[in-house]
Image: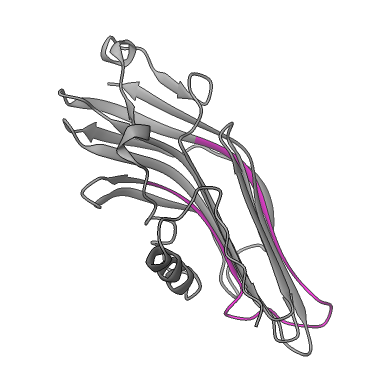
């Protein structure tokens, strides 16, 4: 069995490696991509500008500090995943015969509010595309999936907001699309708590003797706006 697992940030310790391989490789629940860990020294603190009523816009004012990507394949399959701190990301997977593969990315930012609470509106402007394909005269499998979502999670591991932008399962929705979505959320950033504002994507496919399958999600741009209210 061929197994590849990679990340653009180091995973600390063999235990973390095994857990990531085990949990990411099975299923495609709504909580995928929410177990990321960003060291405290990389958290951004809200500055005086946002306290004085000025919106903070990323990546125009600072590069994203959540830029993770993972991939896995076994058998006759391949997977790719990449993330850029300028706001681009991609994951793709393909499989045939006995192969299976998945790929994921997480892109966004971690903030701490500092000593004072902050009421703000968070907007994710996401321009993206997706595609799920299967060989001619073959049907899609329940194991084939792609999903793209935004979420806000705090350092107490509470998911405060979550919205699926794309979520495919057999007999539901188109298998190809491109465009822009801009979900917004009202959030109260509490003092001395870290908040993850993240866009996460995942694809997973399996092959068999009669078909080959491929899936891809490409994010052309992510703009994240935190506007005080």
Q: Is residue 94 visible?
A: no
- In the rendered image, residue 172, in percent from the top left (x then y), is placed at 58, 69
Identify the image quadrant of the C terminus: top left
Within the image, what quadrant is residue 77 found in? Answer: bottom right
Within the image, what quadrant is residue 136 found in? Answer: bottom right
Question: Residue most toward the bottom?
Answer: 209
Q: Is residue 150 depicted above or below 172 in this figure?
A: above
Q: Closer to the camera, 140 or 195? A: 195
Would you say the magenta stretch is mainly helix, strand or loop? strand
Q: Is residue 159 visible?
A: yes
Identify the image quadrant of the N terminus: bottom right
Left or right of 149 on screen, residue 45? left
Q: Closer to the camera, 201 or 183? A: 201
Q: Is residue 208 depicted above or below 9 in this figure?
A: below
What residue span does the magenta drawing correspond to?
125-151
Instruction: Please name the colour scheme applied to the rendered image.
Output: one colour
Residue at image location 69% in from the left, 81% down from the top: 75
Left or right of 135 on screen, residue 71? left
Left or right of 101 on screen, residue 125? left
Within the image, what quadrant is residue 30 found in? Answer: bottom left
């Amino acid at each position: 069995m061929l197994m590849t697992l990679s990340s653009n940030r180091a995973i600390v310790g063999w235990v973390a490696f095994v857990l990531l391989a085990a949990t990411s490789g099975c299923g495609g629940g709504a909580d995928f991509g929410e177990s990321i860990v960003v060291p405290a020294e990389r958290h951004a603190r809200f500055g005086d500008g946002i306290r004085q009523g000025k919106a903070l816009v990323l990546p125009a004012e600072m590069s994203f500090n959540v830029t993770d990507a993972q991939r896995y394949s076994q058998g006759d399959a391949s997977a790719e995943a990449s993330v850029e701190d300028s706001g681009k990301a991609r994951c793709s997977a393909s499989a045939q015969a006995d192969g299976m593969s998945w790929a994921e990315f997480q892109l966004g930012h971690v903030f701490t509010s500092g000593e004072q609470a902050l009421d703000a509106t968070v907007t994710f402007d996401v321009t993206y595309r997706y595609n799920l394909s299967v060989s001619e005269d073959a049907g899609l499998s329940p194991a084939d999936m792609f999903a793209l979502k935004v979420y806000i999670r705090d350092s107490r591991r509470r998911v405060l907001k979550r919205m699926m932008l794309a979520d495919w399962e057999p007999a539901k929705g188109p298998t190809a699309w491109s465009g822009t979505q801009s979900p917004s959320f009202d959030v109260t950033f509490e003092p001395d708590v870290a908040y993850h504002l993240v866009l996460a994507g995942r694809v997973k496919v399996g092959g068999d003797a009669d078909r080959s399958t491929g899936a891809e999600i490409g994010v052309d741009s992510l703009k994240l706006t935190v506007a005080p209210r």
